[in-house]
Amino acid sequence: MTNRLFGLTLAAAALLALPLLGGCQDVDTELKAPEYKTGLPAGEPRISAYKEAFPHQYASYQKNNETSVMTEYKGSVPFHKNDDVNPLPKGYKHAQPYLKNLWLGYPFMYEYNEARGHTYAVKDFVNIDRINRYGEKGGLPATCWNCKTPKMMEWIGKYGDAFWTKDVNTFRGKDAISEMDETIGCSNCHDPATMELRPYSEPLKDWLKRSGKDWDKLSRNEKRTLVCAQCHVEYYFTHKDNGPAGRPVFPWDKGFGPGDMYEYYKSHGPKQADGSSGPFTDWVHAASKVPMIKMQHPEYETFIDGTHGAAGVSCADCHMPYQRVDGKKVSSHWMTSPLKDPELRACRQCHADKTADYLRGRVLYTQEKTFRQLLKAQEESVRAHEAVRLANAVPAEQRAANYDSLMAEAREMVRKGQLYWDYVSAENSVGFHNPAKALDTLTSSITLSQDAINAALKATNYGIAPKLEGDIKKIVPPILKMSRKLQQDPEYLKTHPWFAYLKPLPKADQMWEGNKKIQ
C-alpha cells in the first residue's frame, strides 16, 4: 500500500511539474507564425519601411537608441573598455587595462569600445579608429560590413564573392548608406515580404549547409536563436588558399568550445610546402612576434550548451521578451540586457517564484567571479608575451640546447592562452551565459600562459627570470592610449617599451569623419 501511494505521489508530482518544465520554452513560439504579405521587396534594407505595418515593434526598436543606462558590468554608454585612468561612465568601474597591449600591432589596439544599441551599428562602425581615417582606403576588407547592415544582400547580389576583398571604404559615404535607417534592423532577421524569420548572413547559410541543417525544418524557437547567431558569434575571414578570400566563416566544424576552435584554427591558413593548410593567423603580435588569433564575440557558442541554451531557451526569450501592447502579444524589439529592467520581467517569465533582487544577485555573483578571473588571465597573458619577447632577444650563448623547440612551445601556449582569455573577454555576458564554461576557460587560459612562461624560462636557462618577477603592471605598464594619430608621432612611440616594435605611420591629415569624406 505504501509503495502504491508513493508511486501515485510521484506520478502526480511529475504531472504537476510538466507545466513548470515547459515554462522556459515559450509554447507559442512553436505555433505557426502569423502570415503577412507586406508588399515590401525582398532586398528592402530600411527600418522605416516597416513602421506603418508594425508600429508596436517599430516603437520598441527605437528604444535601442538609448545610450545612458549602465548595468554593473555592461551597458549602452560608449566608452573605451581598456581605460582605467580617465573618467568612465558614472558608476562604472570594470575596465580591462591590458587590451591594447594584447592586440599590439592589430587594428583593435587603436580603439575598442563598449557597444551601443543595434541602431548605432553603422554609425559606430564608420567612426571607429580601426578603420583608417587618414587614407582613401580603410585598410580592412569589405567583409567587415557583414554584421552592420542588411544592404549586404544587395552588395553580395551585385559582386558575389568578389565583394569580400573590396576595401571597406568602397561602401562608405554619406550617399552610400543611411547610418540610422539601414543599420541592423528588421531585414536582418525577417523576410521583408512575408516577415518569416530567415538568415540573411552568408556564413550562417554556409554553416547550415555544412552541418546538414534545413532552415525550413528547424523549430521556430531554434530560428529565434539562430537569427541572433548570424552576428553574435566567433568568425574569421577565409584565407585565399582555402576558398573565396575574405569570406566570413564560422569555425564550428569541430565544436563550439575554445579548444574546438583552436583545433580548427590549426589549419585553414596558408598552404604549406607539402600542400597542407597551415595555422590560421589574424596578425603577429608586435612585441612577442607570436602569430595570434583575435576572437570576436562568441555569445552563441557560449550560450548554446549553458543552462539556458541546453533547456531550449532562445536568445529572444531573454533579450526580446513578449509584451502585451493594446491587447496584443508583441515581441519587444528593444534588444538589450534583461538587467536594465528593475523588475527583471524577462527572467521572471520562467523564474516566477524568485524576486527581482534575488535573480539580480545571482547574475552579479556570476559576473563578479568571472571578471575577477578574467583580469588574472589577462595579466598572465601579458606576462607570457613579455617572457617570449625577452627570450627572443637572448644571445645564442645563453640559450638552452633545445632553445628552438622550447620557444616553439612557448609561442604556441601564448597563442592558445590568449585565445582562451579572449573567448570570455569578447563574449558579452561576463560569464552569465555559461558560468562553468567561462570559469573553466579562464582557468585554462591562465595555465596555458604559465606554461608559455615556463617554456621561455627553460629556453633561456632561466636568465630572464629576474625580469619577470613582481607586479606585471610595473614590468609591462598598461597601454591606455593608442590611436592612428598617436602612431604618427615618433616621440609618442618612445613612451612605452613595447612601442619600439611599431613603425611610425606616415604623417597624414584626417580624410574621413564618420560616413563623410572631409577632404
Image (cartoon, grey):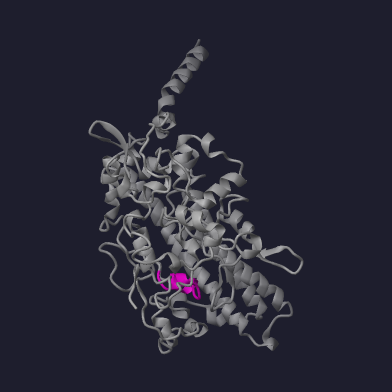
Please tell me whether residue 110 belongs to the stretch shown in magenta: yes
Q: Residue 481 placed where, x, y %?
A: 38, 77
216 or 449, nearer to the observer: 216
Q: Say how many tags the image has.
A: 0
Q: Residue 13 placed where, x, y %?
A: 44, 22
138 or 210, nearer to the observer: 138
Which quadrant would the C terminus be assigned to in this image?
A: bottom left
Above or below — where is 377 with respect to 503?
A: above
447 or 88, nearer to the observer: 88
Q: Is residue 49 left or right of residue 308?
A: left
* Residue at 45% over, 45% down: 227
Dividing the picture into quarters, in which one does residue 178 lie?
bottom left
* Residue at 54% over, 65% down: 165
- Outermost residue, left side: 326
Q: Residue 11 placed where, x, y %?
A: 48, 18
Dividing the picture into quarters, in which one does residue 446 lie?
bottom right
Above or below — where is 206 with respect to 382?
A: above
Q: Residue 134 placed where, x, y %?
A: 40, 78
Residue 192 in sight from this viewpoint: yes
Dividing the picture into quarters, in which one does residue 31 lie?
top left
Please tell me whether residue 224 belongs to the stretch shown in magenta: no
Q: Which residues, given as a range, are shown in magenta?
A: 98-111
Residue 308 in sight from this viewpoint: no
Above or below — where is 169 with respect to 312?
A: below
- Outermost residue, right side: 274
- Outermost residue, top side: 1
* Residue at 41% over, 26% down: 19
* Residue at 55% over, 54% down: 250
Q: Is residue 67 left or right of residue 372?
A: left
